[in-house]
Amino acid sequence: MTSKRFVLTFHPDATGQPITYNLIKKFDIMVNIIKADVSPGEIGHLVMEMTAPAKVLKEGMEYIRQQKVECEPIDKKITCRQDLCIHCGACSAVCFAGALTMKRDSAELLFEPEKCVVCELCLKACPLKLFSIDLG
């Protein structure tokens, strides 16, 4: 089994299609939606992780593209030098995915890489430049 993350971009005329349902039902792909912003008649984005044998993932990606939906793999990840962090919270303020949060009881930064959608906003927000991109 292989797990990969993808960003799907839906054009306004493609938002009414049951794409995730078909990935599950027709291809037997396990789908984990990480972040979604899809509305009828608008450009939408969906970040999801798909798990299946590599051949099935390839077939699923081809199906998505046939539906006129862009499907780009996320082949990079964000790393953080937490040992140098001053816990100012600037990065957590821009992290819409919830991968960077401040602990309420200790005002300490918590980084959960599995939630990261690699939007790269933290790179710009960190005053100490502690975030970097790992191209995997």
Image (spheres, helix red, strand yellow):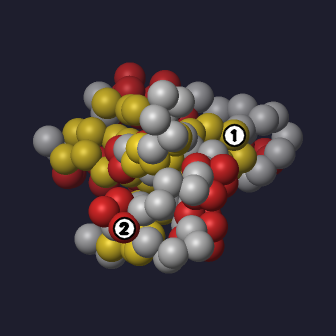
Task: Identify the secondary structure beneath mark 2.
Answer: helix
> x, y (%) of residue 61?
41, 52
Q: Residue at x 31, y 51 (%)?
A: 4
Task: State which quarter of the image contains the C terminus.
Answer: bottom left
Q: CA distance from mark 2 to mark 1?
A: 34 Å
Task: Identify the secondary structure beneath mark 1.
Answer: strand
Q: Residue at x 71, y 38 (%)?
A: 38
Q: Residue at x 59, y 28 (%)?
A: 18
Vertical comparison of 11 with 120: above or below: above
Q: Residues within 10 Å of mark 2 (few under 14, many from 20)?
A: few
Identify the image quadrant of residue 35. top right
> x, y (%) of residue 84?
36, 67
Residue 114 visible in the snapshot? yes
| Residue at mark 1 | 37
Report the amino acid beneath label 1: Asp
Q: Do residues under tags 2 and 1 come within 8 Å of each other at their CB atoms?
A: no
> x, y (%) of residue 134?
33, 73
Task: State which quarter of the image contains the N terminus.
Answer: top left
Q: Residue at x 38, y 23 (%)?
A: 25
> Which is nearer the N-term, disc 2 or disc 1?
1
Which mark's residue is nearer the viewer, 2 or 1? 2
Q: Is residue 42 left or right of residue 5?
A: right
74 or 1, which is in the foreground?
74
Report the amino acid beneath label 2: Leu
Q: Which mark is residue 84?
A: 2
